[in-house]
Image (cartoon, helix red, strand yellow):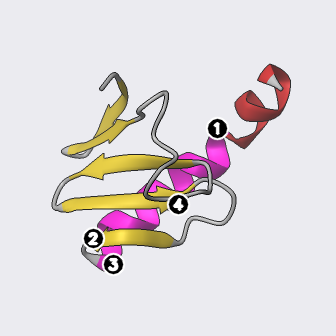
Amino acid sequence: MPTISMCYGILVLMYFYDNKQHSRPHIHVEYGEASIAIDDGSVLAGNLPASKLKLVQAWIEIHREDRRSRS
């Protein structure tokens, strides 16, 4: 699984063909372990401390424009 970002001890990873368990586009986050929806930053599976979840949600927002330019 490729790592697409690392910050504050959080790894943001993405499987290319990972649509069997979660039908929504999402990223995997390793700090604890969680799957986070890309569209709204909600936790699909696992858990993260609230402070780390806020960092991941901020990361998603910062990179929102990157997603739009690729579609």
Asked whether the residues under the numbered discs 4 and 3 touch, taking CB atoms below 8 Å apart as contact, a structural biologist would say no
The stretch in magenta equals: 50-63
Dot 4 alpha-carbon crowd within 10 angstroms: few under 14, some 14 to 19, many 20 or more: some
| Disc 2 residue crowd, few under 14, some 14–19, many 20+, Cα 10 Å | few
Q: CA distance from mark 1 to mark 4?
A: 10 Å
Chief secondary structure of the magenta span?
A: helix
The mark closer to the camera, 3 or 2, is 2
Q: Quick check: 7 above or below 2?
A: below
Distance Cα–Cα, label 3 vs label 1: 20 Å
Q: Disc 2 and disc 4: Cα gap in Å?
A: 15 Å
Q: Which mark is residue 57?
A: 4
Identify the amino acid type marked 1. His
Rendered location of residue 23, percent (x, y): 59, 57
The amino acid pointed to by label 3 is: Ala
| Element type at mark 3 | helix
Q: Nearer the viewer, residue 8 or 4?
A: 4
In magenta stretch: residue 55: yes
Closer mark to the observer between disc 2 and disc 1: 2
Residue annotated with mark 3? 50
Which residue in the structure is indicated by mark 1?
63
Amino acid type for the residue under numbered disc 2: Gly
Q: Is residue 36 above or below residue 27?
A: below
Rendering coords of residue 30 (x, y %): 22, 49
The image quarter containing residue 65 is top right
